[in-house]
Image (cartoon, rainbow, N blue to C red):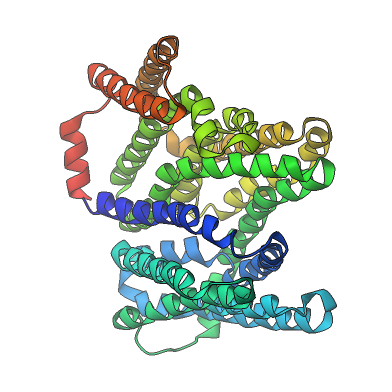
Amino acid sequence: MKILKNYFYNLSYQILVVILPIITTPYITRIFNSQELGDYGYYSSIVTYFILLATLGVANYGTKVISGNRNEISKNFWGIYSLQFSATILSISLYCIFCLCLPFMQNPVAYILGLSLVSKGLDISWLFQGLEDFRKITVRNITVKLVGVTSIFLFVKSENDIYLYVFLLTIFELLGQLSMWIPAREFIGRPHFDIEYAKCHLKPIIMLFLPQIAISLYVTLDRTMLGALASTKDVGIYDQALKLVNILLTLVTSLGSVMLPRVAGLLASGDKRAVNKMHEMSFLIYNLVIFPIMAGMLIVNDDFVQFFLGQDFQDARYAIAIMIFRMFFIGWTNIMGIQILIPHNRNKEFMISTTVPAIISVGLNLIFLPKLGYIGAAIVSVLTEALVWAIQLYFTRRYLKEVAIIGSMTKIVLASAIMYGILLGSKTVIHFPPTLNVIIFAVLGGIIYLFAILSLKVINVKELKQLIRKN
């Protein structure tokens, strides 16, 4: 039951992260022009690389160590945080040098965004993830986001408020990170930076830091290359398609950070049978969600794009039809990478599974983007995720042999195919405005899929209830 609660805590925040920009964007774009928001976006992208250095690979590693060593929380926390603190000081120092030495960085927006480095340096959410206390993280994050958005509507009134706008975005994030240190005191005690003990954590953290660089490379570089090799219009279409697919992905990726501490804790106790059951439940939940969403989105794609994006972005439907298949690969790698390789200390293998596809994606972009534009970018994004999936499948093969996956997945694919076939046939008789079409197909598809799942006996409801209650 705790896993289910943590999943919904995490999912509720992820949904909020998606909804809030939809609310604020129309307001902000009517106050600031493209140049002003462009400056913010430009400097924000630069700061992202310094943030990457400041946080290292602490998040997943810290969660795993805390959850697997509940008797030495304070010692491990300060050992790991010593490295995060040192990396943050280094990152801030380099950023200051960057701002002082490079003329294009001498901008108030760049200076204000420097607070983001301080904020990330104080981020200890990994401690509470390791303790499986997602309630504190979610409540804090939601409160900070809502107060921040409210302050934007209250205080940002004209184009002269661009610096205030950037400041509000960063300061509330900083205050949110500071607030987490208050409940953390009962677990971590007084500060004691042990550099010698911290050294034992350095190698595994670096091994997880390198994949983060690789992931950042193939997640962000595609848009940069698309703009350079094709056109900014292609970037706009691809970016909107990517955002829509990422909204759907929040339903499946939210489970990864919830399951990591539980799996690490069970591995530390030596209960491999329970670990396999957890993996089985993860694959079951992911597959139950992924396949019907993929099938349903292919049905409503045209109508959804028409009412959600408007006339200028109608071509995004073609990119979405390709990129929707990323959901399967990302869903599985969320299990194989975060729930299997990392808890089993297979950090080297995790690094290989992300760095190799990142390098190959650059070459594929050079081939596909000049001729195919946003379609090429969509194809490369799917191929890259498929390669990550294939490599992780190879590295986790001996663990997956002990996990029952194929039987339930075959039934889920069949149920999704039945739903898709009926909905596809229904399109010949259902002709309403786009918004109503999406609602009708979503409800009808949900009913058909649920009936098919129950008929095929995909889920052993009694066993699933016992597993959820136990955890």
Q: Name the residue nearer the viewer: 334 or 201.
A: 334
Left or right of 457? Residue 392 is right
In the rendered image, the vertical position of residue 262 relative to residue 140, given as above or below: above
Q: Is 267 placed above or below 405 here?
A: below
Residue occupying image coordinates x 76% and y 35%: 373
Query: How many marks on residues?
Result: 0
- Image point 59% across, 39% down: which residue? 241
From the viewer's perspective, is 435 left or right of 165?
Answer: left
Q: Toward which corner of the image does residue 211 lie, by quadrant?
A: bottom right
Give the x, y percent position of residue 43.
70, 68
Tell me where residue 268 sits by quadrant: bottom left
Please provide percent x and percent y for residue 91. 66, 77
| Left or right of 266 in this view: 217 | right
Q: State the image quarter where residue 382 is shown.
A: top right
Q: Can residue 402 be seen from the camera position used here?
A: no
Report the front residue among 286 and 86. Answer: 286
Q: As displayed, is residue 385 above or below residue 26?
A: above
**Front residue of this view, candidates 62 and 97:** 97
Q: Answer left or right for 272 relative to 167.
A: left
Q: Can residue 10 be spotted in the picture? A: yes
List x then y, in percent, for residue 237.
66, 39
Give the vertical position of 256 relative to 42 (above or below).
above
Q: 383 or 177: which is nearer to us?
A: 177
Image coordinates for residue 363, horizontal then vertical, percent: 80, 40
